[in-house]
Image (cartoon, grey):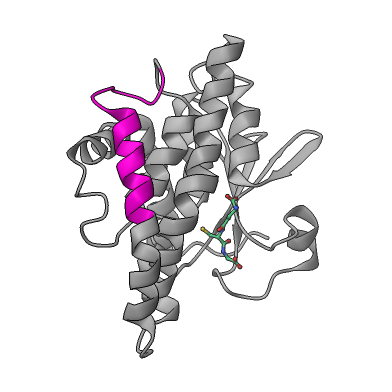
């Protein structure tokens, strides 16, 4: 279990989030990657999501978000950048072969830039549009784009276990994006994506990361930053 208050690596997370975000906060990606490569980390807890951001946090993360990753001499934000950095430490996340590595990074960017914008927009409309008369119309406008991307991804994955020859940060982020796509029927329409998400989320490292994120909320941890 890599959460260790004495560890040299620090990951910033929230001590509280709204119920719909529990288990989905993006420090999960960093926790999961660290668990995969068995690197211990300490947690730095910010007050609840949506609260006021301290100047210190804005200096670390200009958008006031989590995750932030720190190690000696380096403060890094953006989950994708953090995962590339961790992948450079360990080929269990990013293979050494340059072409394989480039394709793994490509898949990670596809998750962040080609799939997540649509799935996340649908997710957001579920709460920013709650009780508004335009909610269903707005979701109907976005849903076909999300459906198209998932159909394309399903075609690319086919019957393969992972997007490339072995599990990489491309799979880690893609699976994290897919498991957050809670719009009914969206992922379920593609049995190979359903089993792909199951394959990722039953990895012991994922489970350990999830337990660590949930433990913070369950313990109602005090803010440490
Ligand atoms: N692109 C960023 C997104 C991070 C992000 O969306 N963080 C959310 C939690 S999941 C957050 O801190 N939201 C609060 C806010 O935006 O003020 C990344 O991948 O690191």
Corner quadrant of residue 8: top right
Q: Residue at x 57, y 9 (%)?
A: 97
Query: Which span is picked out in magenta?
Result: 146-164
Task: Assign the C terminus to one quadrant of the image.
Answer: bottom right
Provide residue 60's location: percent of width, then percent of height. 76, 53
User: Relative to 157, is 219 above or below?
Assistant: below
Quadrant, the N terminus: top left
Number of callouts in the render? Answer: 0
Determine if the magenta segment contains residue 160.
yes
Q: Give the image location of residue 94, x and y in percent.
A: 54, 20
Q: Nearer the viewer, residue 178 or 153?
A: 153
For ligand 1, the image quadrant comes to bottom right
Residue 113 forms part of the magenta stretch: no
The answer to whether residue 207 shows anywhere in this view is no
Could you say where residue 42 lies in the image, as x and y percent from the top left?
59, 42
> Seen in the image, is 53 located left or right of residue 151?
right
- Left/right of residue 10 with respect to residue 129 in the rendered view: right
Question: Is residue 51 among what the camera can see?
Answer: yes
Residue at the location (70% across, 62% down)? 63
Relative height, residue 16 to residue 30 (above, below) = below
Question: What kind of secondary structure does the magenta stretch mostly adopt?
Answer: helix
What residue is rendered at 38% in x and 47% in y? 149
């Amino acid at each position: 279990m890599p959460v260790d208050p004495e560890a040299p690596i620090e990951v910033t997370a929230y001590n509280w989030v709204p119920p719909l975000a529990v288990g989905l906060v993006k420090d999960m990606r960093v926790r999961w990657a660290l668990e995969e490569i068995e690197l211990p980390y300490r947690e730095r807890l910010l007050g609840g999501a949506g609260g006021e951001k301290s100047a210190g946090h804005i200096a670390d993360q200009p958008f006031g978000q989590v995750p932030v990753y720190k190690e000696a001499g380096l403060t890094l934000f953006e989950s994708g950048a953090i995962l590339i950095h961790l992948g450079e430490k360990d080929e269990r996340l990013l293979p050494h072969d340059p072409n394989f590595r480039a394709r793994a990074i490509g898949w990670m960017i596809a998750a962040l830039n080609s799939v997540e914008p649509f799935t996340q927009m649908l997710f957001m409309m579920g709460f920013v549009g709650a009780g508004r008369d335009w909610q269903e119309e707005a979701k109907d406008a976005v849903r076909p784009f999300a459906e198209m991307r998932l159909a394309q991804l399903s075609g690319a994955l086919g019957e393969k276990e992972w997007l490339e020859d072995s599990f990489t940060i491309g799979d880690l982020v893609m699976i994290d994006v897919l498991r957050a796509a809670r719009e009914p029927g969206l992922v379920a329409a593609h049995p190979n994506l359903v089993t792909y998400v199951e394959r990722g989320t039953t990895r012991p490292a994922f489970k350990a990361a999830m337990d660590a994120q949930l433990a913070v909320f369950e313990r109602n941890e005090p803010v440490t930053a």
